[in-house]
Image (spheres, rainbow, N blue to C red):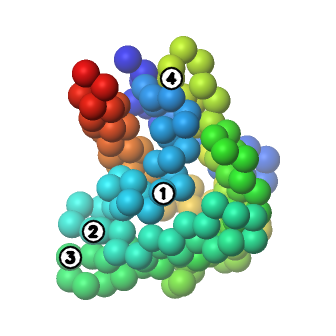
Amino acid sequence: MSSPTLKVEARGDREIVMTRVFDAPRRLVFEAFTKPELLKRWLTGPPGWTLAVCEVSRNVGGSIRYVWRGPAGEEMGLSGVVREITPPERMVATEKFDQSWYPGEAVGTVILTEQGGKTTLTQTIVYESREARDIVLKSPMEQGITMSYNNLAALLAQLANEKSQRSA
């Protein structure tokens, strides 16, 4: 069984690097990051929130749009542009929140490596400034990503179980 531990590290002046191992093949993890019907099942935000809008392009230059909706109807939106995509191993996209809580735009890179049926996800986010990176590090971002990645691990286990039942 893979470790459910998210490792978060500040690197250089403007980067945050996060790593987690998932007990699933990278093809499945990649699909969970790029298919709206799967993203809506794990990238839900805090308890009571949903990913109400989920648009993800799998083409360079295409757009990404997420809008989370809270239990009282509040919304938090994020937009971005796909800069690079190499299925099933690499995705690079910009991100900017509608009500930006840190200055500027960020660029996120997700790299998936598989060994022995387990996938190591390495997510690097580069911010426009050290100030922006430090604001994010002081926020509850780590708890939020841990929660989302726990949801993703549960979804991946469910998808693997569904697949094994179909092939039985």
Of labels 4 and 3, earlier in sequence is 3
Q: Is residue 90 above or below residue 63?
A: above
- Nearer to us of marks 1 and 3 is 1
Which residue is under mark 1?
35
Count neighbours of disc 2 (C-alpha within 10 A) and say few if under 14, some if 14 to 19, many if 20 or more. Answer: some
How busy is the neighbourhood of tag 4: few (under 14 within 10 Å), some, or many (20 plus)? Answer: some
Q: Quadrant of the N terminus?
A: top left
Could you tell me the amino acid type at mark 2?
Answer: Trp
Q: Nearer the viewer, mark 1 or mark 4?
A: 1
Figure check: 35 above or below 152: below
Q: Which residue is mark 4?
A: 118
Amino acid type, residue under disc 1 in the picture: Lys
Q: How many marks?
A: 4
The residue that label 3 is drawn on is: 71
Please say whether residue 144 is visible from this viewpoint: no
Give percent across and percent down for residue 104.
70, 76
Instruction: Identify which amino acid the numbered label 3 is placed on.
Output: Pro
Q: Are the residues tagged 1 and 4 within 8 Å (C-beta)?
A: no
Distance (Cα) linking label 4 and label 2: 29 Å
Would you call the spot at circle 3 few (<14 residues within 10 Å), some (14-19), or many (20 or more)? few
Residue furthest to the front: 167
Residue assigned mark 2: 49
Q: CA distance from mark 1 to mark 3?
A: 24 Å
In-image side of 153 versus 95 (left or right): left
Residue at x-position 30% and y-position 68% = 50
Indicate which label's residue lies in the foreground, 2 or 1.
Answer: 1
Q: Secondary structure at mark 4?
A: strand
In three-dimensional space, the C-alpha distance between marks 1 and 4, rounded to whole angstroms, equals 20 Å
Distance between the alpha carbons at the discs numbered 2 and 3: 6 Å
Q: Residues within 10 Å of mark 1 (few under 14, many from 20)?
A: some
Left or right: 38 with respect to 78? left
Q: Dot 1 lies on which element?
A: loop
